[in-house]
Amino acid sequence: MHILVKGAGVAGLVTAHELLRRGAAVTVVDAAPSLGGGASFMAGGMLAPWCERESAEEAVITLGSIAADWWDNAVPGLVLRNGTLVVAPPRDAAEIDRFARRTRGYRQVGAEEIARLEPHLSGRFSSGLFFPSEAHLDPRTALYRLHEKLARSGVTFSFGATTADGRFDAVIDCTGMAAASALPALRGVRGEMVCLQTNEVEFARPVRLIHPRFPLYVVPRGQGRFMVGATMIESDDDGPPSARSVMELLNAAYAVNPAFGEARILETGAGVRPAFADNLPRIERSGGTHHLNGLFRHGFLLAPAMAGRLADRILTNRESDNAGYRQRQIA
Amino acid sequence: MAFTIYDDVFASRLILGTAQYPSPAVLADAVKRSGTALVTVSLRRESGGGDAFWQLIRDLGVMVLPNTAGCHSVREAVTTAEMARELFQTDRIKLEVIGHHDTLQPDVFALVEAAGELTARGFKVYPYTTDDLVVGERLVEAGCKVLMPWCAPIGSARGPRDLHALRALRAAFPEIPLIVDAGLGRPSHAAAVMELGFDGVLLNTAVARAGDPAAMAAAFASAVTAGRTAHHAVPLEPRDMAVPSTPVIGRAVFA
């Protein structure tokens, strides 16, 4: 079997990996001139299915709980299994209870344990939730490593191309919003982020700040770098972040720790997450092409499980289609 | 249950906001279960590129009330309203001019000015205001045929903070449709303001951020109906003394 994968974002690369692992020959094309760009490179890289359950359906857990192991196997050494810490400013402490009611897999932590987990939050928050089983990784490094590994293992990459010459047994489209014309139900949800650098703050794990109007996370990237994200705006505009959004992100980072006020801004960016109406990913077939799309804000979290299903379906002709998946999800 | 605002007849007295839902699919469910005939939609933050979401809103099959959420000045509000009119092909506009970033309290001075300007431009203005009587009068003078007072700050879920102020508003504007906009947290809050004779309620956070938004939408719909029915049934006023519902003298009558 020789399979063409369109798109070298997280969905495309993970799919290529799953196909290769099952013995297929794989060619990957991407319209961009080189690896990088696209929504995947704006990702937070949190493998946090239990936290995500706060605003997503149960499928984020059923599909997402394998993600940390998958990434650890695919690109060893990148996954940090330090959990997630969720905190709220004192005046929004009631929101912690709401978050707790909507999630599981956490334990309540007080000021002392927060200080033990994250010394740089010492004295700043008196209550929070700790999700010990969650993990995170640096998404860009993960994609570069995955690309390198795939190329070394015989996957052909062609950048600056939307298709490739040759006969393919199947074509898989993982191009996110670029596939919108083939998938009319797909919509874009814009996300904006800021990357900061400071040596005054250290975190071992992603810190989520609950705020009634603006959920936010600060993900440590190592070497004093942090990614602060991400807005959720119903828009397919991938232009630069707005001043308002950057202000809100920076304000929230400042609320987590005022030392972020002195941090350097390394980067601001925006990406458009592809999403279906239920904000869950789908495998669809349209005009002879298989589509894996709609990963929304869960690319790194849900791509492994979805790519595995898709690879199984194509290579073994096993019909574990969406209908079955959706029924299980409702049950 | 139908009622009229400007010349639009609405089959439901519940207006639903469309922000903050876990997904558009959940939003669609909530709209259905609420039985609402009118949903609000924000343009400000999604300026440009929000076509897919707006199409989802149009596809809900109910009337749309675009809002000027996030606007802090008359100019911004008027520009946003004009954009909304073009996008949704409606003259309805929920006018919000935020005066205080933290509490999202309306800037009532700019609100009155913007209401006048938008009325002159042919809009049907639904002003989000405080429970201040004089501001209400100014808004009506500016051309508003509906008032939408808060009962507590937006998203606070506190329920009516000042029932006397809401009563006074109802008494002062017997002919103007009054919708409680902002601050409702639970169906009992909605029932309480409907019992006072308010014409409707506008909800967003209380439904969108509930554990089960669609079920909460249904609960609010029942509460709105209950409150409205109770208002027409003329509820008892509280009394200082116990008033037994059966005679007690002698005690032995039917025992």
Image: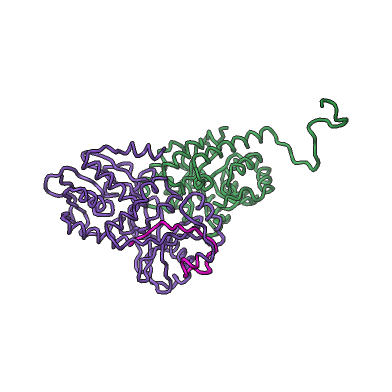
Chain colours: A purple, B green
Is the residue A225 above or below the residue A185 in the image?
below
Is the residue B222 above or below the residue B210 in the image?
above
Between A21 and A55, the residue placed more toward the observer is A21
Residue plotted at (19% across, 52% down) = A28
Residue A239 x %, y %? 33, 58
Can the viewer see residue A243 in this picture? no
Q: Is residue B193 left or right of residue B28?
A: right
Figure quadrant of residue A313: top left
Residue A157 x %, y %? 17, 55
Residue plotted at (37% across, 36% down) = A327
Q: The C terminus of chain B appears in which quarter of the rendering? A: top right
Residue B40 x %, y %? 48, 44
Is the residue A227 above or below the residue A28 in the image?
below
Q: The N terminus of chain B appears in which quarter of the rendering? A: top right
Q: Is residue A115 magenta?
A: yes
Q: Is residue A25 left or right of residue A313?
A: left
| Magenta stretch in the rendered image | A114-137
Is the residue B87 above or below the residue B106 in the image?
above
Between B109 and B222, the residue placed more toward the observer is B222
